[in-house]
Amino acid sequence: MNYAVIMGRLTRDPETRSTTNGKNVTRYTLAVDGYGQNAEADFIPCVAWDKLSDFAAKYFKQGMRVLVSGRIKTGHYTDREGRRVNTTELILSSQEFADSKGQTAPAPTQAPAQAAGDAFLPVDPVDDAGLPWNS
């Protein structure tokens, strides 16, 4: 199964072009936070076709956090110097906003988990006295 779900921020405004047969294609790159200590961001090239292309071109802007899903496509080409260049991109099947309207920068509500000394965020206590398995 080739299916990926990714959430990240647009590194710049999407770029839209038309193919020779009139289909719209929009490309953008998502910066995805790494995981763990010393984690670096990954930059995922995304490709949206047809209605997804139109939506991205109209509503997505640099800095927005979006949630996308689709299939990973790999390929290669030969550059002008004759070197083989490998490519990887996410061909989208869905995309949506991951922040509320107007929010384009991270808004942390808690300190990072690493600052607390473990890999877990604090959890509010739950009153589970009325649940059937606690009888």
Image (cartoon, grey):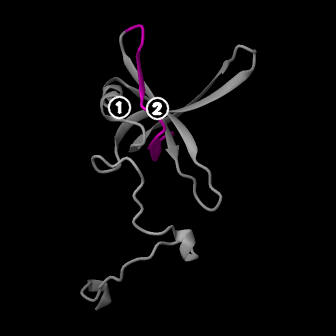
Expressed as whole percent of the image width and height from the top left, the position of residue 114 reads 57, 70
- Tell me where residue 26 sits by quadrant: top left
Expressed as whole percent of the image width and height from the top left, the position of residue 37 reads 63, 62
Classify residue 114 as left or right of residue 12. Answer: right
Quadrant of the rendering where the C terminus is positioned: bottom left
Residue 19 in the magenta stretch? The answer is yes
Expressed as whole percent of the image width and height from the top left, the position of residue 23 reads 36, 15
Q: Residue furthest top?
A: 20
Mark 1 — residue? 56
Expressed as whole percent of the image width and height from the top left, the position of residue 57 reads 35, 28
Label 2 CA crowd tier, 10 Å (few <14, some 14–19, many 20+): many
Mark 2 — residue? 28
Residue 57 in the magenta stretch? The answer is no
Q: Secondary structure at mark 1?
A: helix
The residues tagged by marks 2 and 1 sit, at their Cα atoms, a distance apart of 9 Å
Residue appearing at x 36%, y 39% in the figure:
95
Residue appearing at x 58%, y 44% in the figure:
42
Please say if 103 is above or below 121.
Answer: above
The residue closer to the viewer here, 60 or 53, is 60
Residue appearing at x 35%, y 48% in the figure:
98
Classify residue 101 as left or right of residue 120. Answer: left
Please say if 72 is above or below 129.
Answer: above
- Tell me where residue 25 sits by quadrant: top left
Q: Residue furthest left?
A: 130
Q: Secondary structure at mark 2?
A: strand
Q: Which residues are magenta?
A: 1-21
Classify residue 120 as left or right of residue 62. Answer: right
Do residues under tags 2 and 1 come within 8 Å of each other at their CB atoms?
Answer: yes
Please say if 112 is above or below 5.
Answer: below
Residue appearing at x 42%, y 37% in the figure:
62
Amino acid marked by disc 1: Ala
